[in-house]
Amino acid sequence: MSTSDDVLRDVCQIDFPPAVYGRTLEEIEATNQHIVERVFRDKDGILLSFVNAHTMKPYALEDVKNRPNGIGGFTEHSDIPAEAKAVWMNYENAGQASGIYLDALCAKARATGDKDAGKLASQTVQAIATLWENAAQVQHPNGGSGRGWFPKPYLGMHNLTDMHECSIDQYCDITLGLHKYHLTLANDEEKRLIERIIISFAEWWYDHDYAGIYFGKAIWWKRLPEHPVAAFFLYLNALANSWYPSPKFQHGFEIWRELQGAMTRCADPIWVCMNGIPLKCMEKLIDLRPDLSDDWRRVAQHHARILVVSIEEPQRMNRVYETAGFVANYLSTAHRLMPEAGYDTHVRRCLEACNTRSRYYHLRRGEPVANLSPRESGDDFRDALQAECHVHWLAGYWGSRASRQIEVECVYR
């Protein structure tokens, strides 16, 4: 548990990661890069999603004393093995973290010619491909597995038999990262591999009528009235169809065209990913389906505006969770799409804000503990340092460098 009963604090008592990441954006980038590889890259090459901030190591069973069986937490009713319920945070967002990191590495390699970034990107692609291949061998008796299935690997990428949980943001960030690598660094063999993976994603979701399991609940994504998930399925089907034209993918695209109103029905900022992911997908759709670019730009404008509100007047999850790194990445996309709208100012402000270790926790440090829900206050959740803040920062930084919207200079004189 935290060292304070009043507010969340930086609980790390070891030398690495450093308490201060740097005084310039260039220094922060170098520190972030080092941390991702040293702290979050696991032995199989995939990224951990969180580590215990007291030790900077993956959660162990002995770290979770107040709900070792997940009771009272997010995983109490999740469809994952009992032995993973206490340490679920280790790989909860491994897919998202790995996909976003791949995007950042591609942008870095392209902007600088850094060969090491290219090698790390290739390593990340191979880790994603290994997890995809391992998952394809799983056969659940009631379906929901097989080729194109990409579960959350709560026990690591080689122990997937009893995994059932997945999420759209996981699929989306992996697809975005693989697509970026395909466009920038991939050789011919890697391009063919990436095409097979993403085509299998599109086929799996179409064949399962866009339904899956999320925190123990069966979700038919087509039935959610206010959710931007349509953005990903439009992008996924358009991308798959561009590589392998198919009536199935065309029909999938048409299904989500009919449901695309769900992307913009919600005007309240709830959680930055719900607005950032549509922005990322719209950027890709403008290239894939330029005949509908007016529609895609309207959706992008809607979500960019909400993202600004989410950092200027944070409410709900945006108030309790650490979001600056996420927003830097998402609004750098908004700036590329709308360069005269002033989003670059927000990007720089978010990048500069993330100069200390305390800005990379999952739950915002300084937040009163009384504001946490019971599911957020356990020692499996409360003091977690997260990979996503680090890799989103890197993606925002390199995305900005690529579009020449920031300069490397001293920001903390």
Image: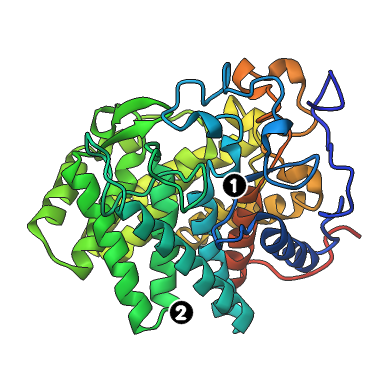
- The residue shown at (68%, 23%) is 378
In this view of the protein, which residue sits in the foreground, 250 or 63? 63
Q: Where 31 sits versus 217, above or below? A: below
- The residue most toward the left is 247
Q: Disc 2 marks which residue?
A: 185
Where does the image place residue 101, in percent across and percent down from the top left?
Answer: 56, 61
The answer to which of marks 2 and 1 sits earlier in the sequence is: 1
In this view of the protein, which residue sits in the foreground, 391 or 64? 64
Where does the image place residue 318, in percent across and percent down from the top left?
Answer: 60, 32
State left or right for residue 253 relative to residue 44. Answer: left
Where does the image place residue 227, in percent across and percent down from the top left?
Answer: 36, 33
Where does the image place residue 351, in percent across and percent down from the top left?
Answer: 70, 55
The reply to whether residue 114 is in sight is no
Q: Secondary structure at mark 1?
A: loop
In this view of the protein, which residue sits in the foreground, 67 or 104? 67
Q: Amino acid at mark 1?
A: Ser
Q: Disc 1 marks which residue?
A: 49
